[in-house]
Amino acid sequence: GGGALNEDNIGQVAQKAKILHLDVDFETSWRRLSLDPLVRPLALKGENYMRYLFEKRQKIFAQIPWKLSNSDGTDLKALAASFWGGLR
């Protein structure tokens, strides 16, 4: 989300909580956003603008240690168990 545009926000949140990056490709993200642009007002600016934001945020998202993605062969059940187990 928009909070990811500021690395300081990520750092402050990470000091008190775990951050989980739900990693999807742009096409999946755009398809979901465009289903109801009134809920996601930035989607009203169009696909090109959303692609720009998506790409801009990738370097920040890459710094988040916990990532949930099925595009890289990650065992999602093991990752989820590790993530939730680390919260205790």
Image: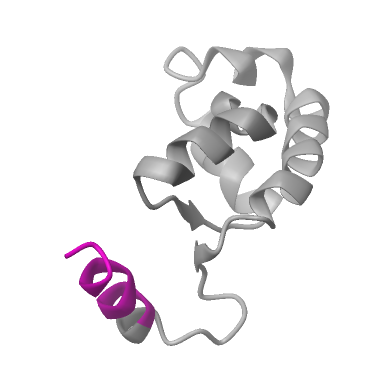
Residue at the spot x=48%, y=55% of the render?
22
Give the left or right position of residue 81, taking residue 47 as reference.
left
Highlighted range, magenta: 79-88
Residue 41 location, quadrant: top right
Q: Measured along the vertical axis of the image, is residue 41 above or below residue 67? A: above
Q: Nearer the viewer, residue 8 or 67?
A: 8
Name the side, left or right, on which 61 lies relative to 79.
Answer: right
Residue 70 horizontal/vertical position (percent): 51, 75
Q: Nearer the viewer, residue 35 or 84?
A: 84
Image quadrant containing the N terminus: top right
Q: Is residue 50 above or below residue 44?
A: below
Front position in the image: 10 or 59:
10
Q: Is residue 1 visible?
A: no
Q: Nearer the viewer, residue 11 or 52?
A: 11
Q: Do we see residue 71 in this rendering?
A: yes
For the C terminus, the quadrant is bottom left
Residue 35 falls left or right of residue 43: left
What residue is shown at x 66% (from left), y 57% (from top)? 25
Residue 53, magenta (yes or no): no
In the image, residue 85 lies in the stretch drawn in magenta: yes
Q: Residue at x 56, y 26 (%)?
A: 3
Q: Residue furthest front?
A: 15
- How many numbered marks, from 0 up? 0
Q: Residue at x 69, y 57 (%)?
A: 62
Question: Where on the picture, by quarter, is residue 55?
Answer: top right
Secondary structure mostly taken by the magenta-highlighted segment of the chain: helix
**What colour scheme has been applied to the protein in the rendered image?**
one colour
Q: Position of residue 75 (x, y in %)?
A: 42, 87
> Residue lying furthest left in this view?
88
